[in-house]
Amino acid sequence: MSQLFAVKPLSQLTSDADHHGGPRLARSLGPVQLISLGIGAIIGAGIFSTVGSAAAGGANHLGAGPALIISFMLTALACGFAALCYAEFAAMVPIAGSAYTYSYATLGELVAWIIGWDLIIEYAIGNVAVAISWSGYFQELLRGFGVTWPVWLGTDYRTAYRALAEYQAANGNIADLGPAVIRNADAVMNAPHIAGIPILFNLPAFLSVMGITWVLVRGVRESAGFNTAMVVLKLVIIAFFLAVGAFYVQPENWTPFAPNGFAGISSAAAIIFFAYIGFDAVSTAAEETKDPQRNMPIGMIGSLVVCTVIYMAVALVLTGLTPWTQLGTAEPLATAFSSRGMHWVSGIISLGAVFATTSVLIVFQMGQPRIFFSMARDGLLPAWAAKVHPKYQTPYITTILTGVFVGLLAGLANIDEVVELTNIGTLFAFVLVAVGILVLRRTNPDAHRPFRTPFVPLVPILAIVSCGYLMAQLPWPTWERFFIWLALGLVVYFAYGYRHSKLRHG
């Protein structure tokens, strides 16, 4: 048991990462690039896609309606408490690994492994949802130019067969079915078949991940520069949405303000949490940051504040443009204008969504290999997972493997289940980081803390309670999938990691 809960001292975490203890990553990122990485990760598929289902509701949750702005505020508070905890750890332990590394320093090896496995859900599985969203907006953009992408090469089996069931249930009365439902049902009926099985694969999602993987293998500096360009472009598009949309806001759409009461607000907050995932991904770049003690807190908290202001403005304009009951689509920002016949604006919004999700793909796809990098350096994964490219100084092996895994899953998975699984995994990581702050303040109170989480223990406790509340809003099937995933992680740990743990700890 002592080996399972062995804690890795802070001094050893740092020494293992220097040039005497193991491979190094190049330090090349400053505060502006870190904030840009955070914004690039946060503003993406969440605000362009899940905001619609959060406002309108659906089969599994209540909609917030115009009170969506309150949902964003609640989620921002929960993330803000967690961000203050992340910032203290990132300043104290400026190496790759994020919550995995912090848990190893405070809660022990077994918990660190669990959180490392859990972070795969956040970064790798989360990127599957982002890639699927990218594909949807990309195909919408092509349709705006009169180009028809083969539907059977742009959807997954679950989505297609669900659409086919709706189509068949309509008994020929398809006037009330959305165009996306008709297209996806058509994919099953007209796709090529092998042995009676239709061939369905989301090829744009797969190709987008492969392209991002190639960029990341070539170097973090090039990746950060590319991401900064994408961030600027998507912020321009969002500013365009706000500027144009403000002229068409109808205040009567804000009544009733909270049609489903606080239950709808809190349910929506759990869904739109996906729109906030990303600020913690900045911490995975700690080992590649110049002056991380100063710049890591600036990067995480700064990006969170900027994005919260943007989200609240978008929610206010969006619910004022269109009745909240009509926003339950995959592309709500575009829907708000297309419902008014302003298709040229919808096309520009779709273009912005492509930029937005591209930058998210970069940051998430950059984060996951660095988790594997740290776990391998600690001996919990094979040594080849910690190899750094001799020219580009990136963890190229895990970057390529992660890219292939994410790309294939994005081509086959349904976005709804992926989003909910990502949310619960990330909230769980936030809870463990907050617990780690409480533990480390007691076990190592004299450690040098360039940034200190204020009002301890109040802030960590608020982070635990608020994140736990949002987790409780998610449906039980999501919890089942989460527990199955963690059980699989424990099997891998005892099959490989524990054996190496005994070697390290004697």
Image: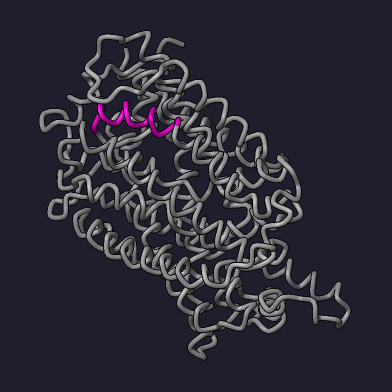
Residue 149 is situated, as x and y percent measured from the top left of the image, at 53, 83
Residue 359 is situated, as x and y percent measured from the top left of the image, at 36, 60
Q: Main secondary structure of the magenta part?
A: helix
Residue 422 is situated, as x and y percent measured from the top left of the image, at 54, 46
Q: Residue at x 39, y 24 (%)?
A: 103
Q: Is residue 482 magenta?
A: no
Q: Residue at x 26, y 47 (%)?
A: 34
In the rendered image of this protein, does residue 88 appear above or below residue 265? above
Name the residue furthest bottom.
Answer: 146
**Quadrant of the rendering where the C terminus is positioned:** top left
In the rendered image of this protein, does residue 304 appear above or below residue 52? above
Q: Is residue 332 left or right of residue 498?
A: right
Q: Is residue 92 magenta?
A: yes
**Total number of numbered discs in the rendering:** 0
Residue 186 is situated, as x and y percent measured from the top left of the image, at 70, 81
Q: Residue at x 53, y 49 (%)?
A: 274
**What span is colored magenta in the figure?**
81-94
